[in-house]
Image (spheres, coloured by chain):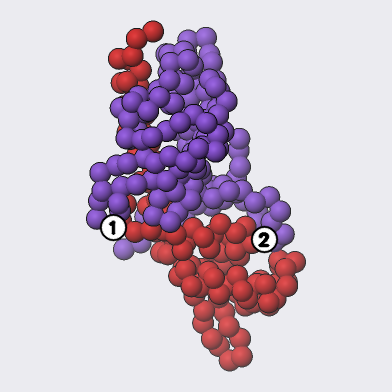
Amino acid sequence: MRSAPTAVFRSLADPTRRSIFESLSRDGEQTVGTLTDRSGVSQPAISKHLGILKHAGLVRARHLGRQTYYSAHAPALAPLVEWMSYYSSFWQERFYRLEDLLNRMDQ
Amino acid sequence: MNTPDTFSVVIERELPHPPEKLWRALTQPPLIKEWLMDNDFQAVAGQHFKFRAAPMPNWNGIIDCRVLVVEPLKKLSYSWASMGLDTTVMFTLIATKGGTIVRMEQSGFRSDRDANYQGATYGWRKFIASLERVVAGLP
């Protein structure tokens, strides 16, 4: 494995952050206000979650006048997708070995 | 079994061997070593153990584990921590007429059911599958 996807994992381990990221991916860029209205979570909480997502590179901010617009940055998901494809092939290969071992074991 | 909030890798196979044999392959260190990795596994819940693979650049080859669930012939689960990333591996065995269905699930993060955000409309797994396509199309 090339890089540790820790920051991406940690930031997406939280269901609220996952939902924020999902919403930004699906519906395009939004302000903290819009995200708050749709969430049922307080604005400071949303801002804190956005900060963590931003730190992990998953979210980008664009300032326009007094508003800040947040958008999803999909390429930051690459380590996570890599993790998944790494372990998919890892376990598939190990399962072939397991089958081979079972065939060699008695009884 | 279906936890859409969990990001995971799943392998499921039906093998023409009895659960007893599979259980041995999953729990006896010399056998585990043959198909998975060198280890000091003990089938006791709460026990810490390590898998050791050949070190690679940026990785010492060590996976720190702790046994979480031991249900002989049915279920085996351990934590799997490597490079600061905590995951959980779970094996489930189901006896069939011709052998055993073995299912392995490695979960990237635990499902947290009390999400209080209203925006989630579709499962994480489906979501990540669509993003995988997005990322695949990137330069």
CA gap between label 2 and label 1 equals 38 Å
For disc 2, the marked residue is B119
Point 55% across, 29% down: residue: B70
Q: Name the side, left or right, on which B75 lies relative to A38.
A: left
For disc 1, the marked residue is B58
- Image quadrant in which the C terminus of chain A is located: top left
Marking on residue A103:
none
Point out residue B64 in the picture as x, y percentages from the top left corner.
42, 46
Point out residue B122 in the picture as x, y percentages from the top left corner.
62, 51
Asked if the residue under mark 1 is in contact with the one under mark 2, i.e. CB atoms within 8 Å, the reply is no
Viewer-proximal residue among B63 and A49: B63
> What is the number of callouts on the image?
2
Q: Are marks 2 and 1 on the same chain?
A: yes
Three-letter code for the amino acid on which mark 2 is drawn: Gly
Chain letter, colour red in render? A
Point 57% across, 67% down: residue: A24
Point out residue B56 in the picture as x, y percentages from the top left corner.
25, 51
**Residue B36 visible in this rendered orientation of the protein:** yes
